[in-house]
């Protein structure tokens, strides 16, 4: 509903009606519309970066392809892009959305990826002295192409172009951090 109607026009009354639950039940689950949006952001984050997760048995390249969900189906990819558009557009009007999305989206994703890198480093699989910077570098490589910075619009390749692009980013990154 946030994507369909926008943040301002999405009311808890409408959400409860769409879910076929009482407003009281909705408020038992989410104390406010902001809490509901936070849950949506958390779900979106998981659709962008599959962490935490167990990937120790996979080669590093395969693990990162799984983490960055290179094989996501077309419909799920459209949903991801739709949410990114929603967040970009609504954040301009509602600063609290920008803060919420940033904290629970990319900042949390960076922390999770840095934790995964730290774990891989302890296993001796990679050589990274600063896992936080490494996580930011890889995320910038992969997701930096999503937003056209000059127009503020989303430009994200779909299908095979997206897979090829992400694979190239992972290849360049892995060749820089692989244990020698």
Image (cartoon, rainbow, N blue to C red):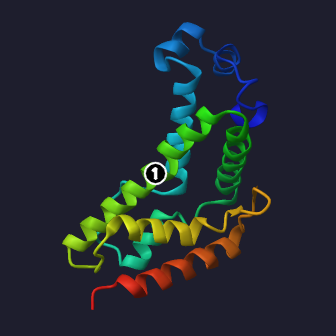
Toward which corner of the image does residue 113 lie, by quadrant? Answer: bottom left
Q: Is mark 1 on a helix, strand or loop?
A: helix
Q: Which residue lies furthest to the bottom in this view?
A: 180
Question: Viewed as shown, does residue 69 lie left or right of 177?
Answer: right
Name the residue tied to disc 1. 107
Query: Could you tell me if residue 29 is visible in this image?
Result: yes
- Total marks shown come to 1
The residue positioned 59% from the left and 61% from the top of the image is 72
Q: In which quarter of the image is the C terminus?
A: bottom left
**Residue at 67% from the left image edge and 33% from the top image edge:** 94
* Of the pair 20 and 33, the residue shown nearer to us: 33
The reply to whether residue 54 is in sight is: no
Q: Is residue 121 above or below residue 52?
A: below
The crowd level at tag 1 (other Cα within 10 Å; few <14, some 14-19, many 20+) is few
Image quarter of the N terminus: top right
In the foreground, 74 or 112: 112
The percent coordinates of residue 130 (x first, y second) are 31, 70
- Residue 158, given in percent of the width and then of the height, sits at 72, 67
Residue drawn at the location 39% of the way across and 68% of the way down: 133
Q: Find residue 159 and report its horizontal and vertical position in percent.
A: 70, 69
Residue 168, compared with residue 84, is above or below; it is: below
Q: Position of residue 89 (x, y in %)?
A: 74, 43
**For this view, does 103 lie left or right of residue 133?**
right
Quadrant of residue 176 within the rendered picture: bottom left
Residue located at (60% from left, 41% from top): 98
């Amino acid at each position: 509903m946030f994507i369909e109607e926008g943040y301002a026009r999405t009311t808890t009354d409408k959400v409860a009606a769409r879910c076929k639950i009482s407003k009281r039940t909705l408020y038992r689950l989410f104390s406010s519309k902001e809490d509901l949006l936070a849950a949506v952001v958390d779900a979106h984050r998981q659709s962008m970066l599959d962490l935490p997760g167990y990937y120790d048995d996979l080669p590093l390249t395969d693990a990162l392809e799984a983490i960055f969900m290179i094989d996501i189906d077309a419909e799920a990819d459209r949903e991801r892009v739709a949410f990114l558009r929603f967040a970009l557009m609504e954040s301009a009007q509602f600063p609290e959305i920008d803060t919420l999305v940033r904290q629970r989206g990319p900042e949390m994703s960076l922390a999770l990826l840095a934790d995964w890198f730290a774990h891989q480093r302890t296993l001796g699989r990679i050589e990274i002295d600063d896992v936080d910077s490494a996580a930011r570098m890889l995320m910038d490589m992969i997701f930096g192409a999503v937003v056209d910075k000059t127009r503020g619009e989303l430009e994200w390749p779909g299908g095979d172009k997206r897979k090829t692009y992400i694979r190239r980013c992972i290849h360049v990154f892995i060749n820089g951090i692989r244990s020698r």
